[in-house]
Image (spheres, helix red, strand yellow):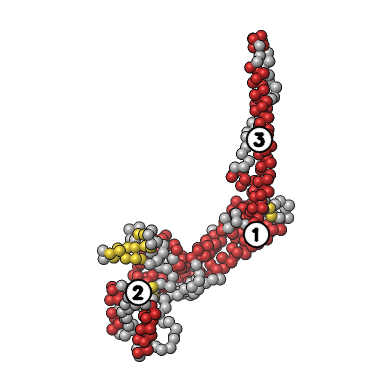
Amino acid sequence: MASLYYPKPQPLSPLPTARWYRKEDCRYYQKQKGKEVLVSGVEVEDSIYYWWFKFLRLSDEYRTACDNNGKGYKELYKDFGNVFDKKYNGVKGFWKWWTENERGAKLFGVKAHGNSWLSLDEAMSLQNDIEENNIKLLAIPTNISKSAIKKRLNKLLERTKDIKKTESEDNEKARYPIENSNIDVNSLKKCYEVYEDFHINKIDIFRIGCRLAFRTDELDELSEDGRTKKRYYERSVLENKKGDDYWKLHKKVMIHLKKKQREDNVWWRKIEQEQKELERMMANRSREELQNNKGFFQSKVGYGRVGERQQVNYLSEQSIADTMLKRGGRVSDKQRTTSKSAMRTNTYRLLRKAEANVNAVLEGTFGRAK
C-alpha cells in the first residue's frame, strides 16, 4: 500500500527474526531490499490497536454476530472478521489478524501526505496521486535555514491556485478512528483486567481493587467488619522514603532499637564476665578436688543461663523495616472503611471505562475515557 501513518503507534511484528532493537539510538530496524530501514512502532501489547482488538473479543454481542455470519453487525464483521477464531489467539494470532490482506493498514492507517519525510520508494508509490493532482511534491534543500524554507514555501503557496485557501476538516482520517487521543495503553490494560475479572472470572470488585493496588497482603485485614476494634498497619507510609511521615517514624524506631541494642549488649557482656570467672575457678581446682570431682560448678551462671537466647542485631536493615511496620502508620477502623470505599470507587471507575469501550468498538470507535 501507499505510505501510511497511524494516529497511535502501530504494532511491530512479534517475530524475533523480523526486526531488531538497536540500543545506540533506542529504535527498531528491519531489512528491506538488503538495507537497514528504521521501523516506526511499538511492541504488540503496547499498541492501542491490539487493545482495540482485545476489547472487541470481550463483546458477547459481537461473538453472537460472528456465530451467525455477522448478523446485526454486517459492516463491522466485513472489516474485522471473526476475531474469536482460534487462529487469532495470543500475540502472534493478533499479528496474523492484523496482517491478513493488510487489514490493520486498511482499518487504521491514514495516507501519509505531508506528515513525514518520504523515501524515494515512498514518493514513487504516490505516482497516481501526483498525476491526478491530489498531491504535489516539493524538493527542499537541507543547506538553508528553516526560516528561509518557510518564506519560500509561503510564496509558493500564494502562487499555487489549486490548493484550498480556507481551512477545512481533514477528510484523510482513519476508517476506524480513536475517540480520545489522550487515552493511554496502561489505562486500557487495567480496564481490560478489571472487566475480565469481574464479568468473566466473577471476582468481587473489592478483591480486584486490592490486587490492582498491590495490597493483597492486607486483604484479610481490610475486609474485616468495620465494627471490630482491630487496627492494621498502613504500608504506604513505609513506601515513600522522601515523605516526612517516613522519617518521623524512622527516628522513633531508631531511638527504640538503639536502646534495645544497648540493653542486649550489656546482658551479653555480663554473661561473658560470668563465664570467664567460672572458667578461672574451675582451672584453679586442687588435685584432690579434681580426683573427687569437687568444685565442678553447675549453677546457672555464664553460658549456663543463656538457654536458647541468641544475640540480636537490632540495627540491621531487616530489623528496622520490621519494627517500622509494627510500630508505625496505624489506621483506625474509620480510616479503613474509607480506604475500602475509595478502592471500590476507583475499581468501579475502571470497570465503567472498560464497559464503555466494549460498547465503543461495536460502534466503530475506541478510546473512551469513561
Give the residue drawn at x 59%, y 59%.
209
Q: Residue at x 32, y 81 (%)?
A: 138
CA separation in Å, label 1 and label 2: 53 Å
* Quadrant of the rendering where the N terminus is positioned: bottom left
* Residue 321 horizontal/vertical position (percent): 61, 47
Q: Residues within 10 Å of mark 3 (few under 14, many from 20)?
A: some
Q: Going by the image, does 253 lie left or right of 101? A: right
Q: Which residue is mark 2?
A: 117
To which residue does mark 3 refer?
265
x and y percentages locating residue 162 in the rendered image: 35, 89
Q: Is 301 situated above or below 98? A: above
In front here: 338 or 296?
A: 296
Q: Nearer the viewer, residue 41 or 356?
A: 41
> Identity of the amino acid at label 2?
Trp
Disc 1 secondary structure class: helix
Residue type of the residue flagged with mark 3 = Asn
Q: Which residue in the structure is indicated by mark 1?
A: 340
Question: What residue lies at 66% left-to-right and 27% top-to-bottom?
Answer: 273
Secondary element type, mark 3: helix
Disc number lying in front (1 or 2): 2
Q: Secondary structure at mark 2?
A: loop
Label tally: 3
Residue 182 placed where, x, y %?
A: 50, 71
- Identified at 71% across, 56% down, the residue is 333
| Comes first in the chain, label 1 or label 2 | 2
Report if the CB atoms under discs 2 and 3 are less than 8 Å apart: no
